[in-house]
Amino acid sequence: SRILILLDASGSMKENFDGQNKFAVATSLLQHVIDSIQLKNPNVQFALRVFGHQFPKSQRNCKDTKLEVPFAKGNADAISSKMKTVTPQGQTAIAYTLFQALTDFPSDSLSTNSIILITDGIETCDGDLCSVSEQFNKKRISLKPFIVGMGLADSLKTFFDCIGTFINTNNQQQFGSAVNAVVSQALN
């Protein structure tokens, strides 16, 4: 099994979420989940792609996404180290990031591939999420990302309908439960 984590590091991830910085909450919980899974099942491979972290929001860089840690067994420490060096600051280029994520998975017809997108906002770069979903289908990649929202307004929840399963959370406990449930589903 391979799980690609797409982590939002846009400027809004510096905002407060249930008493803490959103990015700190997300990275802390992700690290805990990855560590526990690798202890139970060392065959699971993780990778980390971050977006919105290389350029300040004022530069409006809509291609600000990078595979920071490629797939490998036992790379929890590498993911943890990388997350500690990231500073949220840029745009929320979700569609472009998903499109780039298509190339992150090694060719292997025997593996199950999942994407987990952690974000606190919607697309700020005019990307078309439904178009990206069509590209997944055209390439015969049956990936339906899991999207875990951090305090999104109810009016924005339908924004993610065409690409995957969306779970919105309003506090750290809900966020933790959602990430654990999503990872469990991805592994099954």
Image (spheres, rainbow, N blue to C red):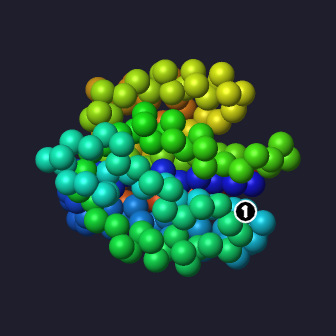
* Quadrant of res 76: bottom right
Q: Is residue 62 left or right of residue 182?
A: left
Identify the residue at horizontal 38%, vertical 74% (top origin).
84
Label 1 SS: loop
Residue at numbered disc 1: 44
- The residue lying furthest to the left in this view is 58
The quarter of the picture where the N terminus appears is: bottom right
Looking at the rendered structure, the number of numbered marks drawn on it comes to: 1
- 108 vs 159: above or below: below
Q: Is residue 87 left or right of residue 99?
A: left
Identify the residue at horizontal 21%, vertical 42% (top origin).
60
Q: Toward the viewer: 88 or 176?
A: 88
Q: Toward the viewer: 179 or 101?
A: 101
Does residue 92 appear anywhere in the picture? yes
| Residue 136 x/y as whole percent | 61, 29
* Quadrant of res 102: top right
| Residue 161 x/y as whole percent | 47, 25
Q: Is residue 41 left or right of residue 88?
A: right
Q: Toward the viewer: 73 or 179?
A: 73
| Residue 30 x/y as whole percent | 49, 64
- The residue lying furthest to the right in this view is 110
Identify the residue at horizontal 14%, vertical 47% (top origin).
58
| Residue 150 x/y as whole percent | 35, 48
Does residue 161 appear anywhere in the picture? no
Identify the residue at horizontal 49%, vertical 62% (top origin).
68
Under mark 1, the amino acid is Val
Q: Residues within 10 Å of mark 1 (few under 14, many from 20)?
A: many
